[in-house]
Amino acid sequence: MRITVNRKAHFNAAHRLYRREWDDQKNAEVFGKCSNPHFHGHNYELIVSVTGEIDPETGFLIDLKILKDLIYEEVEEKLDHKNLNLEVPEFENLNPTAENIAVVIWNKLRDKIDQKHDLEVTLYETPRNFVTYKGE
């Protein structure tokens, strides 16, 4: 029997969507207000989902305290109250779109969660705009 457990978290971060090789006009045409040279921020909501078999010995798929600590150490401590463009090495040459942030988070967590489990990351940039990445 396969089951999915979910853990919610949040972090606040600033970013600017832009391409260095484009001028401000083209960046504004493509990214709109999100290309503000002075940055802008979001209150990101994160759902980390782990799917697999229940361990018959513990009754857990994964200990949620371990998942909570992992998300805190790998995501919240590294992204919360940061300027993603300037303070997070993964975005030095990667545009910090919601899509790319979700992939970065998935990559940070994947090696720390038993490979027999599937991992999915859902990132809400706003209550209406969100992305999901399953490592595919």
Image: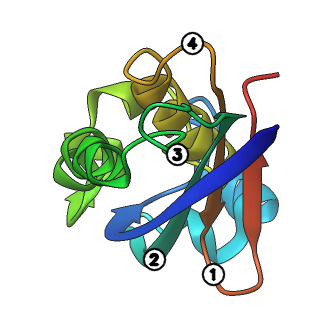
Give the quadrant of residue 130: bottom right
Q: Tell me whether the residue at label 3 lies in contact with that at label 4, contact meaning CB atoms closer than 8 angstroms.
A: no
Where residue 99 appears, x then y in whole percent?
A: 69, 46
Residue 29, compared with residue 118, is above or below; it is below
Task: Count residues near mark 3 (Cα–Cα under 10 Å), then give few for <14, some for 14-19, many for 20+.
Answer: many
Please name the residue that numbered disc 4 is placed on: 115
| Helix, strand or loop status at disc 4 | loop
* Whole-number angstrom distance, CA of label 2 to CA of label 1: 7 Å
The first of marks 3 and 4 along the sequence is: 3
Please name the residue that numbered disc 2 is placed on: 42
Where residue 38 appears, x then y in whole percent?
A: 35, 69
In the image, which disc is placed on residue 96? 3
Q: Nearer the viewer, residue 9 or 19?
A: 9
Please name the residue that numbered disc 1 is placed on: 126
Q: Tell me whether the residue at label 1 lies in contact with that at label 3, contact meaning CB atoms closer than 8 angstroms.
A: no
The first of marks 4 and 1 along the sequence is: 4
The first of marks 1 and 3 along the sequence is: 3
The first of marks 2 and 4 along the sequence is: 2
